[in-house]
Amino acid sequence: MHVVFISSACETLAIEYLSAVIKRAGHRCSLCFDPQLFDDTFLKNRPLKRLFDYSEDIIEELKAHAPDLIAFSVVSDNYPWAVALADKIKRAMDVPIVFGGVHPTSVPEYVMQQPSVDYLVVGEGEEALVELVDNLKQPAACRNIPNVWARSGGEIIHNDVRPLLQNLDALPFPDKQIFLDKIPWLSDGYITITSRGCVNKCTFCNNSLYKDTIYRGKGPFFRRRGADRVLEELIEARRRYPYKTVHFWDEIFISDKEWLARFLNGYKREIGVPFTCCIHVNFIDEETVARLKDAGCWQAIMGVQSLDEELKKKVLNRRETNRQVQKSIALLKEAGILTICENMLGLPTQTEDDLIHMLNFYNQTRPNRLSLYFIRYYPRTGIIESALQEGILTADDVEAINRGLNARSFIQGGTIRKLNFARIQAFLTLVPVLPSWLNRFLIRIRFYRIMPNLGMLTHSIARLLDRHKEFDVDAFQFKMRYKIFMLRKLGRMINHLFRIPRASDKKAPAAKTLP
């Protein structure tokens, strides 16, 4: 069987693991990549989106592949794109389409309302997708696979999820080549993950939905790969791809201190390239920070979300204190690790005074960069109940969130954007790069009230002013995606516009009839 994955700039690692297990089962995998120019989580422009649309190119490529199954890995932020492209594919080809990923897992009954979706995989998809591919020629068998939803005439069949995979070391290494064949510059920064699940249950995150509902009673939710197995992957990958840096995409990379020490010792000895990771203040101390720095950590991303401790407890289900945040920033900065603090705006019960407190707090603690996003309410997450109680969301809003067809990422402004908060957002983003004395003066005169609503532009400005850009592979890959795919599309347009007919294109002269 031949499976073709359709991917945008999201969900690369999920597809790499799925491709690896499908290939191990003896099937073929290919990739069609949509660069989503001017329609991604950072840039939106309808005229330019139409000009640089790649959907017809993808359909032509699919026809050449002649797949047995077309697969999408979907998060809520790219769900509208996935549905629109799947609809176009269905009009052009009669091939079954399967959706999997976070959004289909959260609201499968809504996703199965889309006529272009034939199958849906809930939860972790490796075992279920292999089973589906194995049985594609037997539709009756496909309707009885754990984790899989399917159609049977006008009826939708849904099956229970299987237990969570506990031995992550049994998985093959991710199939990086499936993306590198299309976008080779990804090899500069190697992305991997050492764990699945999360030790926390934040109300705004889909992990809490997975843990408390979908996978309740299906085994321990947080699982970690063996340190030696991760090192083996990185060593093998380095032989094939001379990467410059590593990105660990774990929800919280440092949650297991014993595992971390064992892994970082091996990483320093065997790998030795700079790396980035996501951390949490509950697991930060002097010893952990020293180990990170010694092993080559150059950047740490820390989710703070709010500095209102009461809001954290009641709305976000988090217990860390501002004193912990302050100490963590100080430890990371003293070690020379670039510190990024992520925060949410527009949270239930959040006020303008909370954001003024945030301005003063970060002007004192001075992390290297602030990432500030309006909250994006994801389907069936616990925080939606708080938003309903506060009157931020209505029942119709919740229905729209579940349908997902008007989704807007948190980077683009979240679910609901407040203008006064947006002005403070612009100021907050610049706080780490402006002098403390100037920030104090601007806060005192309430300069934020006349700040322009610049959206993500201030994030870009702050990033450009950052002195630690040598390993900023994300920015490099974003630039390359636009540069390469814009030039490719423009080249095709020019060739089409000025195409000189070849000899084979000319019509043969009509044959003369004999008298």
Image (cartoon, helix red, strand yellow):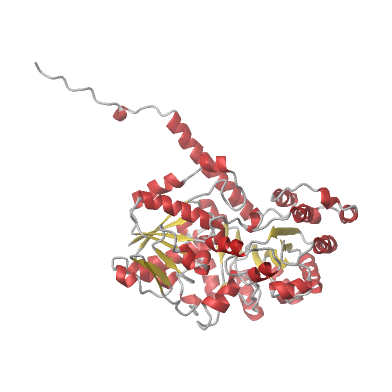
- Name, please, the residue furthest toward the top: 515
Q: Along the line of sight, which residue is nearer the eye, 384 or 399?
A: 399
Residue 469 appears in the picture as rendered: yes
Q: Is residue 174 left or right of residue 401?
A: left
Q: Position of residue 375 (x, y in %)?
A: 67, 62
The residue depicted at 57 percent of the width and 56 percent of the height is 407
Number of dots carrying numbers:
0
In depth, the one of 440 and 232 nearer the eye is 440
Is residue 224 visible in the rendered image? The answer is: no
Q: Is residue 433 above or below residue 105?
A: above
Q: Nearer the viewer, residue 394 or 412?
A: 394
Instruction: Report whether 125 appears left or right of 49.
Output: left
Residue 7 spot, x, y in % from top left: 48, 56
Question: For residue 391, which quarter of the picture?
Answer: bottom right
Across and down, in percent, residue 155 comes to 37, 68
Residue drawn at (41%, 58%) of the image: 115
Residue under the point 71% across and 75% down: 318
Q: Nearer the viewer, residue 241 or 499?
A: 499
Along the horizontal axis of the image, is 156 left or right of 195? left
x and y, in percent, of residue 33 in the image: 47, 52
Q: Is residue 165 above or below residue 426?
A: below
Is residue 240 shown left or right of residue 344? left
Quadrant in which the N terminus is drawn = bottom left
Q: Residue at x 71, y 65 (%)?
A: 347
Task: Give the quadrant of the C terminus.
Answer: top left
